[in-house]
Image (tube, helix red, strand yellow):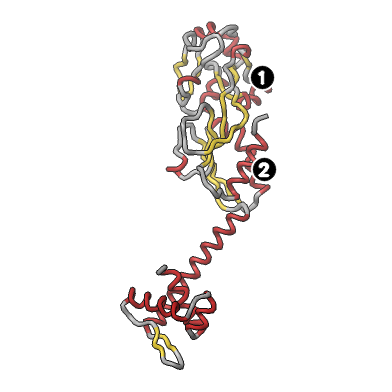
Amino acid sequence: MDKLRSMEVFVAAVDTGSFTAAAERFGISAVMVGKHVRELEQRLGAALLTRTTRRQSLTEIGRQYAEQCRAILAQIGAAESLAETMRVAPRGVLKVTAAVSFGMEWLSPMIPDFLEMYPEVSVDLNLNDRMIDMVEEGFDVAVRIGTLEDSSLVARPLRPYGVVICGSPGYLARRGVPQVPADLAQHECLEFSGWVPQARWRLKGDKDGRHVALSRLRANNSYALKQAALKGFGLIMQAETALAQDIAAGRLVRVLDDYLPTPRPMHLLYPRDRQPTPKLTSFIDFMLARLGPR
Protein backbone atom coordinates (compact mmCIF):
# COMPACT_ATOMS: atom_id res chain seq x y z
CA MET A 1 0.00 0.00 0.00
CA ASP A 2 1.00 3.60 -0.50
CA LYS A 3 2.51 4.84 2.75
CA LEU A 4 1.26 8.41 2.43
CA ARG A 5 -2.27 7.26 1.70
CA SER A 6 -2.10 4.95 4.73
CA MET A 7 -0.99 7.91 6.86
CA GLU A 8 -3.89 10.00 5.53
CA VAL A 9 -6.38 7.24 6.30
CA PHE A 10 -4.92 6.72 9.78
CA VAL A 11 -5.14 10.43 10.64
CA ALA A 12 -8.72 10.51 9.34
CA ALA A 13 -9.61 7.55 11.54
CA VAL A 14 -8.12 9.36 14.54
CA ASP A 15 -9.82 12.68 13.77
CA THR A 16 -13.26 11.22 13.02
CA GLY A 17 -13.11 8.69 15.84
CA SER A 18 -14.10 5.66 13.74
CA PHE A 19 -13.08 3.53 10.79
CA THR A 20 -16.54 3.97 9.28
CA ALA A 21 -16.35 7.76 9.22
CA ALA A 22 -12.81 7.64 7.79
CA ALA A 23 -14.02 5.19 5.12
CA GLU A 24 -16.77 7.61 4.07
CA ARG A 25 -14.24 10.43 3.74
CA PHE A 26 -12.09 8.45 1.30
CA GLY A 27 -14.84 6.49 -0.42
CA ILE A 28 -13.52 3.11 0.71
CA SER A 29 -14.75 0.39 3.05
CA ALA A 30 -14.14 0.27 6.80
CA VAL A 31 -12.31 -3.00 6.21
CA MET A 32 -9.88 -1.18 3.89
CA VAL A 33 -9.32 1.49 6.56
CA GLY A 34 -8.35 -1.29 8.93
CA LYS A 35 -5.89 -2.67 6.37
CA HIS A 36 -4.22 0.74 6.04
CA VAL A 37 -3.81 1.02 9.80
CA ARG A 38 -2.46 -2.53 10.14
CA GLU A 39 0.00 -1.85 7.31
CA LEU A 40 1.41 1.08 9.29
CA GLU A 41 1.55 -0.95 12.49
CA GLN A 42 3.46 -3.69 10.72
CA ARG A 43 5.95 -1.16 9.33
CA LEU A 44 6.45 0.38 12.77
CA GLY A 45 6.31 -2.84 14.74
CA ALA A 46 3.96 -1.26 17.26
CA ALA A 47 0.24 -0.83 17.86
CA LEU A 48 -1.21 2.58 17.01
CA LEU A 49 -4.83 2.07 18.07
CA THR A 50 -6.68 -0.04 20.61
CA ARG A 51 -10.25 -0.83 19.60
CA THR A 52 -13.25 -2.26 21.34
CA THR A 53 -16.77 -2.75 20.05
CA ARG A 54 -17.73 0.68 21.35
CA ARG A 55 -14.67 2.90 21.02
CA GLN A 56 -11.13 3.29 19.81
CA SER A 57 -8.21 5.04 21.46
CA LEU A 58 -4.65 5.87 20.57
CA THR A 59 -1.68 4.19 22.14
CA GLU A 60 1.16 6.43 23.31
CA ILE A 61 3.12 5.61 20.16
CA GLY A 62 -0.05 6.14 18.13
CA ARG A 63 -0.56 9.62 19.61
CA GLN A 64 2.97 10.77 18.76
CA TYR A 65 2.85 9.11 15.36
CA ALA A 66 -0.45 10.83 14.53
CA GLU A 67 1.07 14.23 15.37
CA GLN A 68 4.04 13.57 13.10
CA CYS A 69 1.74 12.36 10.33
CA ARG A 70 -0.28 15.57 10.52
CA ALA A 71 2.89 17.66 10.23
CA ILE A 72 4.17 15.64 7.27
CA LEU A 73 0.85 15.75 5.45
CA ALA A 74 0.57 19.49 6.06
CA GLN A 75 4.02 20.04 4.53
CA ILE A 76 3.13 17.95 1.51
CA GLY A 77 -0.11 19.88 1.10
CA ALA A 78 1.74 23.19 1.30
CA ALA A 79 4.31 22.04 -1.27
CA GLU A 80 1.58 20.88 -3.66
CA SER A 81 -0.33 24.12 -3.18
CA LEU A 82 2.79 26.17 -3.93
CA ALA A 83 3.55 24.13 -7.04
CA GLU A 84 -0.03 24.50 -8.26
CA THR A 85 0.04 28.23 -7.61
CA MET A 86 3.29 28.61 -9.56
CA ARG A 87 1.65 26.77 -12.45
CA VAL A 88 -1.29 29.15 -12.45
CA ALA A 89 0.44 32.57 -12.35
CA PRO A 90 3.98 33.76 -13.14
CA ARG A 91 6.00 33.82 -9.93
CA GLY A 92 9.35 32.71 -8.59
CA VAL A 93 12.97 33.17 -9.69
CA LEU A 94 13.80 32.93 -13.41
CA LYS A 95 17.46 32.19 -14.19
CA VAL A 96 18.52 33.70 -17.53
CA THR A 97 21.89 33.60 -19.28
CA ALA A 98 23.22 35.42 -22.35
CA ALA A 99 26.45 36.66 -23.89
CA VAL A 100 27.89 39.79 -22.25
CA SER A 101 27.51 42.18 -25.18
CA PHE A 102 23.98 41.09 -26.04
CA GLY A 103 22.99 41.03 -22.38
CA MET A 104 24.31 44.51 -21.66
CA GLU A 105 23.03 46.23 -24.77
CA TRP A 106 19.82 44.35 -25.56
CA LEU A 107 18.60 42.22 -22.69
CA SER A 108 19.38 44.30 -19.60
CA PRO A 109 17.31 47.31 -20.74
CA MET A 110 14.31 45.05 -21.37
CA ILE A 111 14.34 43.11 -18.08
CA PRO A 112 12.81 45.95 -15.99
CA ASP A 113 9.86 46.07 -18.40
CA PHE A 114 9.33 42.34 -17.95
CA LEU A 115 9.53 42.64 -14.15
CA GLU A 116 7.05 45.52 -14.24
CA MET A 117 4.61 43.30 -16.09
CA TYR A 118 5.05 40.37 -13.68
CA PRO A 119 5.62 41.71 -10.14
CA GLU A 120 5.84 38.24 -8.55
CA VAL A 121 8.73 37.14 -10.78
CA SER A 122 12.41 37.76 -9.98
CA VAL A 123 15.17 37.47 -12.60
CA ASP A 124 18.67 36.15 -11.92
CA LEU A 125 20.62 37.34 -14.99
CA ASN A 126 24.01 35.78 -15.76
CA LEU A 127 26.03 37.43 -18.54
CA ASN A 128 28.85 35.20 -19.66
CA ASP A 129 30.72 34.73 -22.93
CA ARG A 130 31.50 31.08 -22.28
CA MET A 131 29.17 28.31 -23.42
CA ILE A 132 27.04 27.40 -20.43
CA ASP A 133 25.43 24.01 -19.84
CA MET A 134 21.93 25.18 -19.03
CA VAL A 135 20.68 21.96 -17.47
CA GLU A 136 23.79 21.29 -15.40
CA GLU A 137 23.99 24.88 -14.11
CA GLY A 138 20.26 25.22 -13.51
CA PHE A 139 19.27 27.95 -15.97
CA ASP A 140 15.68 28.30 -17.14
CA VAL A 141 16.37 30.09 -20.42
CA ALA A 142 19.30 31.27 -22.55
CA VAL A 143 19.89 33.46 -25.58
CA ARG A 144 22.38 31.90 -27.99
CA ILE A 145 23.94 33.53 -31.05
CA GLY A 146 25.20 31.48 -33.99
CA THR A 147 24.45 28.07 -35.46
CA LEU A 148 23.09 25.66 -32.87
CA GLU A 149 24.49 22.22 -32.27
CA ASP A 150 22.10 19.30 -31.93
CA SER A 151 20.45 19.63 -28.57
CA SER A 152 17.58 18.34 -26.47
CA LEU A 153 16.69 21.97 -25.72
CA VAL A 154 13.78 23.80 -27.33
CA ALA A 155 15.02 26.55 -29.70
CA ARG A 156 12.78 29.50 -30.61
CA PRO A 157 14.19 31.73 -33.38
CA LEU A 158 14.75 35.41 -32.71
CA ARG A 159 15.68 38.07 -35.26
CA PRO A 160 19.17 37.57 -36.79
CA TYR A 161 22.21 39.05 -35.05
CA GLY A 162 23.94 41.52 -37.37
CA VAL A 163 27.36 43.09 -36.78
CA VAL A 164 29.21 46.23 -37.88
CA ILE A 165 32.90 47.08 -38.10
CA CYS A 166 34.08 50.27 -36.45
CA GLY A 167 37.15 52.22 -35.45
CA SER A 168 37.70 55.43 -33.54
CA PRO A 169 38.24 58.63 -35.56
CA GLY A 170 41.78 58.88 -34.19
CA TYR A 171 42.63 55.32 -35.16
CA LEU A 172 41.27 55.73 -38.69
CA ALA A 173 43.11 59.00 -39.15
CA ARG A 174 46.34 57.32 -38.08
CA ARG A 175 46.00 53.98 -39.90
CA GLY A 176 43.68 54.84 -42.76
CA VAL A 177 40.09 53.86 -43.57
CA PRO A 178 39.87 50.32 -45.02
CA GLN A 179 38.00 50.23 -48.32
CA VAL A 180 38.03 46.47 -49.05
CA PRO A 181 38.70 43.38 -46.90
CA ALA A 182 42.28 43.15 -48.23
CA ASP A 183 43.03 46.45 -46.45
CA LEU A 184 42.57 44.72 -43.09
CA ALA A 185 46.07 43.29 -43.48
CA GLN A 186 47.28 46.74 -42.42
CA HIS A 187 45.05 46.99 -39.34
CA GLU A 188 44.66 45.73 -35.79
CA CYS A 189 41.52 43.56 -35.91
CA LEU A 190 40.44 43.08 -32.30
CA GLU A 191 39.54 39.46 -31.72
CA PHE A 192 36.92 37.99 -29.43
CA SER A 193 38.38 34.71 -28.20
CA GLY A 194 34.94 33.22 -27.64
CA TRP A 195 34.05 33.26 -31.34
CA VAL A 196 33.48 29.97 -33.07
CA PRO A 197 35.83 29.60 -36.10
CA GLN A 198 33.20 30.46 -38.70
CA ALA A 199 32.44 33.77 -36.97
CA ARG A 200 35.99 35.15 -36.78
CA TRP A 201 36.35 38.19 -39.07
CA ARG A 202 34.83 36.41 -42.07
CA LEU A 203 33.76 39.17 -44.47
CA LYS A 204 32.16 39.07 -47.89
CA GLY A 205 34.97 38.74 -50.40
CA ASP A 206 37.34 37.34 -47.77
CA LYS A 207 35.56 34.24 -46.52
CA ASP A 208 38.63 32.48 -45.19
CA GLY A 209 39.90 35.56 -43.35
CA ARG A 210 43.27 35.41 -45.10
CA HIS A 211 43.55 39.22 -45.33
CA VAL A 212 42.76 39.90 -41.68
CA ALA A 213 45.64 40.90 -39.41
CA LEU A 214 44.36 39.79 -36.02
CA SER A 215 45.21 42.17 -33.23
CA ARG A 216 47.80 41.61 -30.54
CA LEU A 217 44.87 42.02 -28.18
CA ARG A 218 42.43 39.16 -27.72
CA ALA A 219 39.73 39.06 -25.04
CA ASN A 220 36.91 36.82 -23.96
CA ASN A 221 34.78 39.85 -23.10
CA SER A 222 33.21 42.03 -25.77
CA TYR A 223 33.03 45.08 -23.51
CA ALA A 224 36.80 44.98 -23.03
CA LEU A 225 37.28 44.96 -26.81
CA LYS A 226 34.96 47.93 -27.23
CA GLN A 227 36.99 49.90 -24.71
CA ALA A 228 40.16 49.13 -26.67
CA ALA A 229 38.50 50.33 -29.88
CA LEU A 230 37.34 53.53 -28.20
CA LYS A 231 40.91 54.12 -27.07
CA GLY A 232 42.02 53.91 -30.68
CA PHE A 233 43.86 50.60 -30.53
CA GLY A 234 42.14 48.80 -33.41
CA LEU A 235 39.03 47.91 -35.37
CA ILE A 236 36.15 46.12 -33.71
CA MET A 237 33.41 43.88 -35.14
CA GLN A 238 30.39 43.68 -32.86
CA ALA A 239 26.61 43.82 -32.87
CA GLU A 240 25.30 47.09 -34.27
CA THR A 241 23.08 47.55 -31.24
CA ALA A 242 26.09 47.25 -28.92
CA LEU A 243 27.91 50.05 -30.74
CA ALA A 244 24.95 52.23 -31.76
CA GLN A 245 25.37 54.89 -29.06
CA ASP A 246 29.10 55.28 -29.69
CA ILE A 247 28.48 55.52 -33.45
CA ALA A 248 25.77 58.14 -32.97
CA ALA A 249 28.07 60.16 -30.69
CA GLY A 250 30.93 60.00 -33.19
CA ARG A 251 33.19 58.01 -30.88
CA LEU A 252 33.24 55.18 -33.43
CA VAL A 253 32.95 55.25 -37.21
CA ARG A 254 31.52 52.45 -39.36
CA VAL A 255 33.69 50.97 -42.12
CA LEU A 256 33.37 48.21 -44.73
CA ASP A 257 29.55 48.20 -44.64
CA ASP A 258 29.42 46.56 -48.09
CA TYR A 259 31.44 43.58 -46.85
CA LEU A 260 29.77 42.79 -43.54
CA PRO A 261 29.13 39.10 -42.85
CA THR A 262 25.65 37.68 -43.13
CA PRO A 263 23.77 38.16 -39.85
CA ARG A 264 23.98 35.10 -37.62
CA PRO A 265 20.93 33.28 -36.29
CA MET A 266 19.86 33.95 -32.72
CA HIS A 267 17.68 31.68 -30.61
CA LEU A 268 15.94 31.54 -27.28
CA LEU A 269 16.70 28.18 -25.65
CA TYR A 270 14.99 26.43 -22.76
CA PRO A 271 14.74 22.86 -21.45
CA ARG A 272 12.04 20.67 -22.92
CA ASP A 273 9.21 20.42 -20.40
CA ARG A 274 5.72 19.17 -21.05
CA GLN A 275 4.41 21.65 -18.49
CA PRO A 276 6.63 24.77 -18.47
CA THR A 277 5.96 27.18 -15.62
CA PRO A 278 4.11 30.45 -16.22
CA LYS A 279 7.27 32.42 -15.30
CA LEU A 280 9.06 30.75 -18.23
CA THR A 281 6.21 30.94 -20.75
CA SER A 282 5.62 34.61 -19.92
CA PHE A 283 9.32 35.38 -20.52
CA ILE A 284 9.28 33.45 -23.81
CA ASP A 285 6.24 35.41 -24.99
CA PHE A 286 7.87 38.67 -23.88
CA MET A 287 11.11 37.96 -25.75
CA LEU A 288 9.32 36.87 -28.92
CA ALA A 289 7.23 40.06 -28.84
CA ARG A 290 10.35 42.22 -28.46
CA LEU A 291 12.93 40.31 -30.52
CA GLY A 292 10.97 37.80 -32.57
CA PRO A 293 11.54 37.43 -36.33
CA ARG A 294 10.19 40.36 -38.30
Mark 2, other Cα within 10 Å: few <14 / some 14–19 / many ≥20: few
Q: Amino acid at mark 1?
A: Gly
Q: Taking 192 as reference, is 85 left or right? A: right
Foreground residue, 106 or 196? 196
Q: Residue at x 60, y 36 (%)?
A: 107
* Quadrant including the C terminus: top right
Figure check: 276 above or below 58: above
Q: Quadrant of residue 268?
A: top right
**Disc number for residue 250:** 1
**Disc number for residue 113:** 2
Which type of secondary structure does the marked residue at label 1 adopt?
Answer: loop
Which type of secondary structure does the marked residue at label 2 adopt?
Answer: helix
Q: Give whichever of discs 2 and 1 has the lower sequence position.
A: 2
How far across and how far down the image is residue 37, in percent?
40, 78
**Disc number for residue 163:** none
CB under 8 Å between discs 2 and 1: no
Q: Residue furthest bottom?
A: 54
Q: Residue at x 43, y 92 (%)?
A: 53
Foreground residue, 99 or 202? 202
